[in-house]
Image: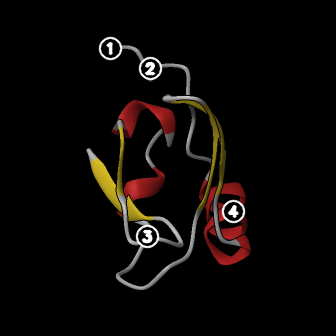
Amino acid sequence: MLIVNDDEFNQIEVPLRLIKGAEKLLQAGDVIGVGMDGDHIVQISLPSAVLDKIRSIGISDTNADE
């Protein structure tokens, strides 16, 4: 579980399965976007540096539910 703060300093719990291995590349202070529909997370936006690293090392989401 990843905990992030919104603009009002409310904490949002993001299950690690939603970021599919990217948690290993995130660092303290990285800014991620979390799109919400009520209490449900509908979108995650990772920093471009993390996305570039994912593309370069090929993290796969094929085992995300295991």
Label 4 and label 2: CA atoms lie apart by: 18 Å
User: Do the residues bearing badges 1 and 2 touch, measured as CB atoms within 8 Å?
Assistant: yes
Sequence-first disc among 4 and 1:
4
Amino acid type assigned to the residue bearing label 2 in the image: Asn
**Residue denoted by label 3:** 26
Q: Up-down: is 51 above or below 2?
A: below
Who is closer to the viewer here, 24 or 3? Answer: 3
Q: CA distance from mark 3 to mark 2?
A: 20 Å
| Secondary element at tag 2 | loop
Residue matched to label 4: 51
Q: Secondary structure at mark 4?
A: helix
Query: Image quadrant of residue 5?
Result: bottom left
- Residue at the spot 39% in from the left edge and 62% down from the top edge: 4
The residue furthest top is 66
Residue found 38% across the figure and 71% down from its top: 9
**Mark 1, other Cα within 10 Å: few <14 / some 14–19 / many ≥20:** few
Task: Report whether 24 appears left or right of 40.
Answer: left
| Element class at badge 1 | loop
**Dots 4 and 1: beta carbons under 8 Å?**
no
Give the Cα distance between marks 4 and 3: 10 Å
Residue reaching furthest to the bottom: 29
Residue 63 horizontal side relative to residue 47, left or right = left
Residue 45 % position (x, y) = 68, 55
Q: Which residue is farthest left? A: 1
Residue 34: x, y in percent? 60, 51
Q: CA distance from mark 1 to mark 3?
A: 21 Å
Residue corresponding to mark 1: 66
Tell me the kind of residue under disc 1: Glu
Q: Earlier in the sequence, mark 4 or mark 3?
A: 3
Query: Which-is-in-front pick, marks 4 and 2?
Result: 4
For marks 4 and 1, give the CA distance. 22 Å
